[in-house]
Amino acid sequence: MKILVVGDLMKDFVFELKLLNQQPLDINPFICGGTLMNMTKSASIHFDDVMSLGCLHSSDADAFVNQMSGINISPMIQLIENDSTGLCIKLMDSGVRVNMISFRGANRHLRWSEEISTAILESDIIYLNGWSLLGDTETSETCAHIIQIANKMSKQVVFDILPHDITNERCGDNYKNAIRHSDFIISEKVAFASIFGQDSESVNFTHPLLLSAKAIVLFDWVSRVSLIDRINGITSDDETFYDHNTSAKYALDNIALKLIKEHIKC
């Protein structure tokens, strides 16, 4: 199966709080991060053919291509000249993240193109997340169109509800339509409850935003991941473990995609 992944690319700078007053502040080199990197890494474990779609400023293209070269993917990176590459500053305490500041920058300017249309046509699964559908941005409009075309082509759409503190009030029309027209929903349990007013024990597929959903993957930060099927209820239940050197979200997405792939094959 071939999967098209759409998300944000960020320049990650990670600082350990205990060391900030003990050594000069060094902001180079940055780490290539963002939702697109996590999603692409997870997808590359389970799918043989992965296309990765995102935006950055042209001055950072070489750095990102070099760091992405170790992943078996086909990058589709749009170079943006009028905005800087997304930026994320993470503050850590003994390896645990205690705060994060981010600026989406170029990630707000994803443009529709014939290349994207061809990528959708060639893919079996389209994998997006909520950051790309937030706000009144060019990226939000493009991603809404991606989902619309994917539906017309009968592709499987996977939508990851982000950010985790999302509320129903923050979900605009494009965001809600993305949920409404997705085959699979991935969500942290608290975010799911905030949007749908349901907990993991009482998922109701008759909710107006869930009428197209075939299954929902819910997780908590204790690392329990469950797939809830429209017809059969909880059909898969798995655990994942991660250390301080592994992104928790990456580890959880890894399990989520595994469960979704198994469900599609069935």
Image: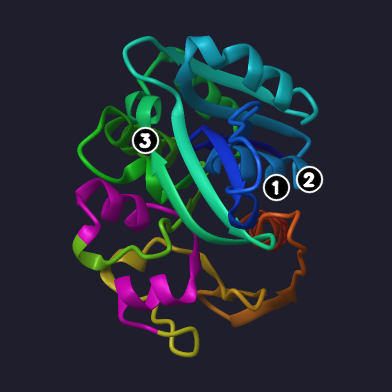
- Labels 2 and 1 touching (C-beta < 8 A): yes
Q: Position of residue 26 (x, y in %)?
A: 62, 32
Q: CA distance from mark 1 to mark 3?
A: 20 Å
Q: Nearer the viewer, residue 118 or 71?
A: 71
Amino acid, disc 3:
Cys
Q: Nearer the viewer, residue 260 or 153?
A: 260
Q: Secondary structure at mark 3?
A: helix
Label ID, residue 45 = 2
Q: CA distance from mark 3 to mark 2?
A: 24 Å
Above or below: residue 78 compared with residue 208:
above
Residue corresponding to mark 3? 143
Residue drawn at 58 percent across, 55 percent down: 17
Above or below: residue 84 compared with residue 12:
above
Q: Is residue 188 visible?
A: yes
Q: Give left or right: position of 199 versus 250.
A: left
Amino acid, disc 1:
Ser
